[in-house]
Amino acid sequence: MDRLNGPPRLMIVSDLDFTMVDHEDPKNLSLLRFNALWEAYYRHDSLLVYSTGRSPTIYKQLRNEKPLLTPDITIMSVGTEIAYGEPMVPDYDWEQHLNLNWDRDIITQETAKFPQLIPQSGTEQRPHKVSFFLEKPNSLEVIKALSESLEKHKLDVKIIYSHGTALDVLPKGADKGQALAYLQRKLKANGRVPLSSLVCGDSGNDAELFTVPDVYGVMVGNAQEELLQWCAENARNNPNIIHSTERCASGIIQAIGKFSIGPNVSPRDIKDWGKCRVNVLSPGYEVVKFYLLYERWRRAEVEKSDQILQNLKSSFYPLGTFVHPSGTEQPMSKCKDMMERLYGDKQGKQYCIWLDRVSTSQIGSDAWLVKFDKWESTGEERHCCLTTVLLNTKQAEEGFTWMHIHQTWLDGLETKPRIVWFL
C-alpha cells in the first residue's frame, strides 16, 4: 500500500478459484484479459486484493500454475490470514485479534466426534482455521450438531460450508468480510479510503464480502447456488450487487463497466489498433500494448505486413541498446530484423505473454522509466525476467519511442538454451 501517493482509485477484492481463475479455461483467456486491463489502466493508482480460502502453501502453488498478477494484499485461509506485497509480510495485529475466545484444541476434540468430517491436508490446517471435507447430503445435520457442541464450550466460532464439499471452523471474528472491513479501517486511518471498491466471488465462503458497507459486488456468471441463494435472501434489493452474465475474470471486467468505476475494455479485446484509436498516452498502456502485439506476431495472429514492421522500426531508437537477460547487448536497430525472423514461430502453440507489477516514473519532461516482470509461457514452461524500459514521448505524433531495454532473469525462471527469448 505504501507505493500509492494517495487514496486508491479502485480496490478490487476477489476470490481466486472460479472467480479470478477459471479452472475450466485451460488457455486462461479471461484471466489474461483481466491482467492486461489491470496493468494498462489500474496498477499505478489502485489496489488488487486476493481473498481466498486457500492456505499460503496452496495459494503459492496456484500462482505457479496460473498467470496470476502479484496482489498488493492477500487474504488467505478464509479471512484468517492477511499478508502484504510480494514478500507476503504477515499482519500480526490481525492474528492477535483472532486469538480472543479461540481454542483450537477444543475444536479439534469436538470435530473428531463426527466421522462424516474428513480432515483436509495438513497444509490447510491453520492457526485459526480447522478444515474438513463434508459430503453435501450430510451437511445440514452435521453442521447443526457441531454448532451445538461448540456452543457448549462458549467458544466464539463460526462454521462456513462452501462448494458443497468444504467445511471450515473459524473464529467468530474471522471471515473474508471481516478481514476486508479490518483493511478498510487501516486504510481510513492512513487517509487512503479507496474511491471505489469492488468485491467478487462465486461461492458460500464469499458471502461475507457482500455485507461490507460501501462496496460494489459481483457474483460471477458461474456463481454457485449457495451464494445466489444467500444473495436472494440478504441482498435482493441492493442495486450495487449484480450477477454477471460472464464467467470468472470476464465477469469482473463486466462489473467494472456496469458500475462505471473505470476503463473496462481490456487491451486484449482490441484486435486492430490501427482501426481502434484509444485515447491513452500512458507508458503502462504502451508496454502492455507492445507485448500483446509481440505475442500475436509470434503466433501469426496479425498479418506480416510492411506497415507493422515500419511502425516497429519507428518505435525503436536506432542508437539505443537492448540488453538481453544473458547480459549480451545489441543495438535497438536490430530488433526489427529479429522480430521479422520470429514471425509465426509460436503458431499453433499455447503461447502467451503477460506483464506484472508495471511501475512508471517520469524522469524528465518527455522521458519515462517503466519497470515490470515480463512473463512468457509455452504450454507448461514459464519464464520471467525483470524488464526496465526507457521511453521518450514522440515530438511530432502521439506515442513513445523505446530508447533502451534492459532485462534480468528472475531466480529460477531463466530459459533453457534451446528456447528463443527476445525482448
Image (cartoon, helix red, strand yellow):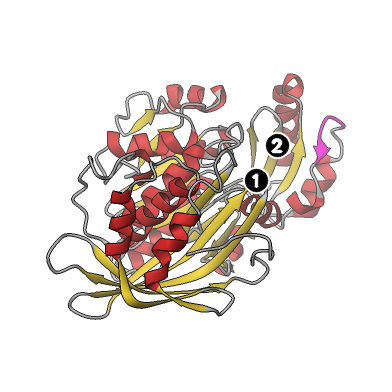
Q: Nearer the viewer, residue 158 or 255?
A: 255
Residue 118 belongs to the span the image colors magenta? yes
Residue 311 belongs to the span the image colors magenta? no
**What residue lies at 21% left-to-right and 59% top-to-bottom?**
281
Q: Quadrant of the N terminus?
A: bottom left
Residue 104 can be seen in this image: yes
Q: Nearer the viewer, residue 213 or 17?
A: 17
Residue 258 left/right relative to 164 = left
Residue receiving disc 1 = 379
Q: Point out which mark residue 340 bears.
A: none
* Residue 163 percent coordinates (x, y): 64, 30
Mark 1 and mark 2: span between their CA atoms? Answer: 34 Å
Check disc 1 and give the amino acid type: Gly
Residue 118 left/right relative to 248 = right
Instruction: State which region is magenta.
Output: 115-119
Check disc 2 and give the amino acid type: Leu
Quarter assignment of residue 362: bottom left
* Residue 415 percent coordinates (x, y): 65, 64
Q: Point out which mark residue 167 bears.
A: 2
